[in-house]
C-alpha cells in the first residue's frame, strides 16, 4: 500500500458485505476512501442473498465518498479503450483511481495491473 487515498472496487465491497473481508485494515491505513459512481451502481445492483446483506452494504457505502465520472475521467476512459480491450466499468474504475490518485483495492488485479500509466493495485487477503 503506497498512497493515502484508496478507491475500492465492487468486488471488495461485496466480499465485505458477505463477511469475507475485514475492511477495517484498509480503512485504518488510508485517510480517504472512495468508490467510483460505477462501483456504487454495481454494488447496489448486486443480487444480495438476503435483506441483511443489502442493509450491511448500504451501511458500508456510507463510509465512502462517491466519486463522479468527470470529463477528465471520461477522456481517460476513451483513450484507454481505444488502446486496449477492456470492459467499460473496469475502464471507469481505473480512470477514476488514476485521475484522483487513489490506490485501487480490488480482487481483479489482472484487470488493472498491466494498464498504462500504472496505478497501485492492492489485492486484499481473504485469509
Image: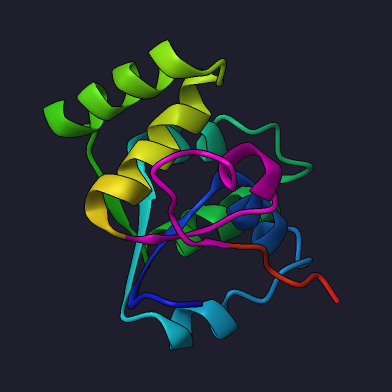
Residue occupying the point 66% across, 59% down? 17
Residue occupying the point 32% across, 48% down? 98
Residue 39 appears in the picture as rendered: yes
Q: Count of labels shown? A: 0
Residue 2 coordinates in the image, percent (x, y)? 44, 77
Residue 51 appears in the picture as rendered: no
Which residues make up the magenta segment? 102-121
Residue 77 coordinates in the image, percent (x, y)? 34, 24
Q: Residue furthest right?
A: 127
Residue occupying the point 86% across, 77% down? 127
* Scheme of colours in the image: rainbow
Report if residue 106 lies within the magenta region: yes
Quick check: 106 left or right of 58?
right
Q: Quadrant of residue 10?
A: top right
Residue 23 coordinates in the image, percent (x, y)? 59, 74
Most foreground residue, 56 or 7: 7
Most foreground residue, 55 or 35: 35
Amino acid at each position: 500500500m503506497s498512497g493515502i487515498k484508496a478507491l475500492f472496487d465492487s468486488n471488495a465491497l461485496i466480499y465485505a458485505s458477505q463477511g469475507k473481508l475485514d475492511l477495517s485494515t484498509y480503512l485504518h491505513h488510508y485517510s480517504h476512501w472512495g468508490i467510483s459512481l460505477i462501483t456504487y451502481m454495481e454494488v447496489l445492483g448486486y443480487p444480495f442473498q438476503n435483506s441483511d446483506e443489502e442493509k450491511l452494504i448500504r451501511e458500508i457505502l456510507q463510509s465512502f465518498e462517491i466519486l463522479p465520472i468527470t470529463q477528465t475521467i471520461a477522456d481517460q476512459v476513451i483513450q484507454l479503450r481505444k488502446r486496449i480491450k477492456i470492459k467499460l466499468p473496469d475502464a471507469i474504475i481505473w480512470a477514476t483511481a488514476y485521475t484522483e490518485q487513489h490506490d485501487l483495492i480490488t480482487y481483479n488485479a489482472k484487470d488493472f495491473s498491466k494498464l498504462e500509466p500504472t496505478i497501485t493495485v492492492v489485492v486484499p487477503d481473504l485469509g
